[in-house]
Amino acid sequence: MLPSGQLLPIGNSVSTDTPIRSSVELGAVIREQRKRLALKQLDLAGLGNTGNRFIVDLENGKPTVQLQKVLDLMDLLGLEVVVRTKASRSASSL
């Protein structure tokens, strides 16, 4: 993570409760937040102590990226994962 407790400016963050149903959707949310924070992929890779290839793969929705690295980068960007029960579907939507 960032040295000596340094934090990124969170500001204009992603709206709350953005449901994610695929690795592609997750990658898009991460890309949007990175851009909101005016970071390049190389910047995020350096701050997150990972390779640029990992950032590219993550943002492109590669389904086999390492979960802990994803969670660490999300934390760095001021994002978090919240698990909840899906809202029930109405009979007409089945």
Image (cartoon, grey):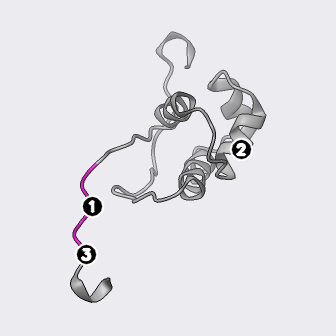
Q: Are marks 1 and 3 in contact (CB under 8 Å)?
A: yes
- Residue 10 visible in rendering: yes
Tag shown at residue 86: 1
Q: Dot 3, how many residues are within 10 Å of its Cα: few (below 14), some (14-19), or many (20+)?
A: few
Cα–Cα span, label 1 and label 2: 28 Å
Helix, strand or loop under label 2: helix
Q: Amino acid at mark 1?
A: Lys
Assign the C terminus to one quadrant of the image: bottom left
Q: Amino acid at mark 3?
A: Arg
Residue 66 vs 83, above or below: the answer is above
Cα–Cα span, label 1 and label 3: 9 Å
User: Residue 77's spot in the image, x, y percent?
Assistant: 51, 37
Mark 2 sits on what residue? 57
- Residue 40 visible in rendering: no
Mark 3 sits on what residue? 89
- The residue under the point 22% across, 84% down is 91
Q: Indicate which disc, 2 or 3, sits on the residue closer to the N terminus.
A: 2
- The residue under the point 58% across, 44% down is 37
